[in-house]
Structures are given as structure tokens and as C-alpha cells.
Amino acid sequence: MIFPQEYSIVSLAADHILSISEAFNQIGWNKPESLFEGYLNEQELGARLVWVAHFKGEFAGYITLKWQSQYPSFKAQNIPEIMDLNVSPCMRKIGVGSLLLDRAEKEALTKSQSVGIGVGLYAGADGEYRPAQRLYVKCGYIPDGKGVTYNYQPAIPVNSYPLDDDLVLWFTKKLR
């Protein structure tokens, strides 16, 4: 369990970008600086919020909250979307993901009574989406009942889709 003095969660700032990108590059994940520069730009425009977590002074993970989702169901219902929750594998199972989710949910509650999140369907060598799938259910997220999408569009039965990051099951959580 994390104790308050051991962690910090702060808004993304320009001076975080290089260290975050390097942390993911060291474990073989493609998270280029340009991704976080785009997030910072969206944050400055008010379209997205981004939080960065540190545990005992070391980068632990990040999460973003997008006010207008690209997923048609969330967009139509004005449900903000938690996107791109990533916790460094060496920082998993100590509560970082839960703390980041909690931070994003508290902010989502300022504009909505629900929040949404999508999760990929595969479990790779480093766990990929497996930890996220379990965490979301544990934290009270339930499938939205609309099935799987590919690139934000409903998957059509008997069609084939690549098992990649764009094949997603969507969840919601009531915040009140």
C-alpha cells in the first residue's frame, strides 16, 4: 500500500516529457516525446487533462482525461473518457494505477456523473492490457453493453480484426 508521503500526482508539465518518454523507451514501449507534447498542447487548450505519478521520487505512471471522447456512445452522452493509463511495470501492484484513476474520476465528476474508459483485449509478454482489465473491474467499471469496437466503430460479427490496440471493449462507471 502506498503512503501519502511516498507518492505525488501532478499535472503534466513540459519538463516531464523527456523523462517519461525515456522511462518507457527503456522498457521497450514506444511512447515518443511527441505524444506527450500533443497531450500538453491539448491540456493547455482545455481538451484533456494529464497527471503524472511519482513513487519515492521515481516516475511511476500517467493518466489522461479527455473531455470529449472519440467513442460515439460516450460523445453522444457527454461522458468524459479516461485514456492512456500507463503504469511502469516495476510500479504495478502498489496502488499507482488506482491512485491515478481516482484522480481522473474526481476531475470527471466536476462535469459528469459518469466516466468512461476503453481497454484493449490482449495480454502480451509484459501483461499489456491484463492488469488494466482487472483493475477497471476491481474499481467498479462495467462494460457499456455495446460490444467491442475497432477504431471506435462497432465490430461486425464474422468480420476479422487485428488483435491490436484499436480493438477495444468500453466500460463506464457512475461517479455518484
Image: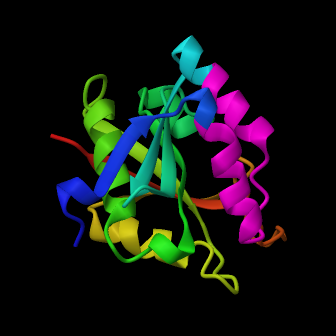
Q: Is residue 120 visible?
A: yes
Q: Bounds of the magenta span?
A: 16-41
Q: Main secondary structure of the magenta part?
A: helix
Q: Residue furthest top?
A: 45
Q: Give the percent coordinates (x, y) of residue 75.
A: 52, 29
Q: Is residue 30 magenta?
A: yes
Q: Is residue 175 magenta?
A: no
**Viewer-side residue, 94 vs 14:** 14
Measured along the vertical axis of the image, is residue 59 above or below residue 133? above
Q: Give the percent coordinates (x, y) of residue 106.
A: 25, 37
Measured along the vertical axis of the image, is residue 4 above or below residue 48? below
Quarter of the image that includes the N terminus: bottom left
* Residue ID at (25%, 31%): 109
* Residue ID at (25%, 33%): 113
Count up the numbered dots. Answer: 0
Residue 70 occupies quadrant: top right
Q: Residue furthest bottom?
A: 125
**Viewer-side residue, 45 vs 54:** 54
* Residue ID at (79%, 36%): 34
Q: Give the percent coordinates (x, y) of residue 152.
A: 68, 46
* Residue ID at (43%, 26%): 78
Q: Residue furthest left?
A: 176
Q: Give the percent coordinates (x, y) of residue 54.
A: 42, 53
